[in-house]
Image (cartoon, helix red, strand yellow):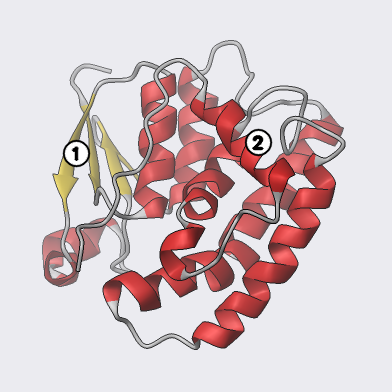
Amino acid sequence: MSRSMRLYGGKLSGHSHRVELLLGLLSLPYELIPMPPADRKTPAFLAMNPFGQIPVIDDDGVIVADSNAILIYLAKRYDEKRTWLPEGPVEAAAVQRWLSVAAGQLAYGPAAARLGAVFKLPVDQSQAAEIAGRLFNVMDSYLAKRSFLAADHPTVADLACYSYTRAAPEGGIALSSHPNIVAWLERLEALPKFQRMPDPPAG
């Protein structure tokens, strides 16, 4: 990198936070450029991501949009040890499975519930809670037998699923009945240079 990477995102966005997590864990310098909703409709931003969604990174002219795609890009380009994105077929398939969960059940469950509760967006809270409940039951049983989601060490799969899982209580989704998920969150938070997503302002 000839200069610090630019991350167009937001401190309260779980999608943006998962990218910040990997940037920090890889010790990559970056500049966070806050992008409130109105700014995501500007021609300049839409030229980077026509869907008008955060996050987007500009890595010295290389533009990558979508949080999971950015995780793959960063791991492929900057993780020389290949730990965050394992290349073995079993581990790689497991990573992809949980990236799909992050874009599916996690987005439509805990993340959607948080959007409704914290940001007052129109969300079917009961449906989001039902999806979250099923997801967390599966995750908790899965994590009863392993420490991390896709390998015997943390990968981008864990980072993709961390932020909205940790923030689930903000959307009214309790984690107290899922001790294996709580233990997994704590293992991730114990990693050097790990930073939690800020709490939303009261009210």
Residue 120 rendering spot, x and y as whole percentages: 29, 80
The quarter of the displayed image where residue 201 is located:
bottom left
Q: Residues within 10 Å of mark 1 (few under 14, many from 20)?
A: some
Residue at position x 38%, y 37% in the image: 196
Residue 21 position (above or below residue 63): above
Residue 70 rendering spot, x and y as whole percentages: 44, 42
- Locate the N terminus by quadrant: top left
Query: In the picture provided, is 193 more to the left or to the right than 89?
Result: left
The amino acid type, in three-letter code, at marker 1 is: Leu
Query: Closer to the camera, 164 or 102?
Result: 164
Residue 27 rendering spot, x and y as whole percentages: 36, 16
Residue at position x 76%, y 50% in the image: 140
How many numbered discs? 2
Q: Is residue 65 visible?
A: no
Residue at position x 54%, y 39% in the image: 159
* Mark 1 vs 2, N-terminal side: 1
The quarter of the displayed image where residue 105 is located:
bottom right
Residue where numbered disc 1 is placed: 32
Query: Closer to the camera, 44 or 144?
Result: 144
- Locate the C terminus by quadrant: bottom left
Residue 157 position (above or below residue 136): above
Q: Is residue 35 visible?
A: yes
| Mark 1 to mark 2 CA distance (whole Å) | 27 Å
SS label for mark 1: strand
Query: In the picture provided, is 84 more to the left or to the right than 96?
Result: left
Residue where numbered disc 2 is placed: 184
The amino acid type, in three-letter code, at marker 2 is: Trp
SS label for mark 2: helix
Mark closer to the observer (1, 2): 2
Residue at position x 69%, y 49% in the image: 98
Residue 140 position (above or below residue 105): above
Numbered circle sitting on residue 19: none
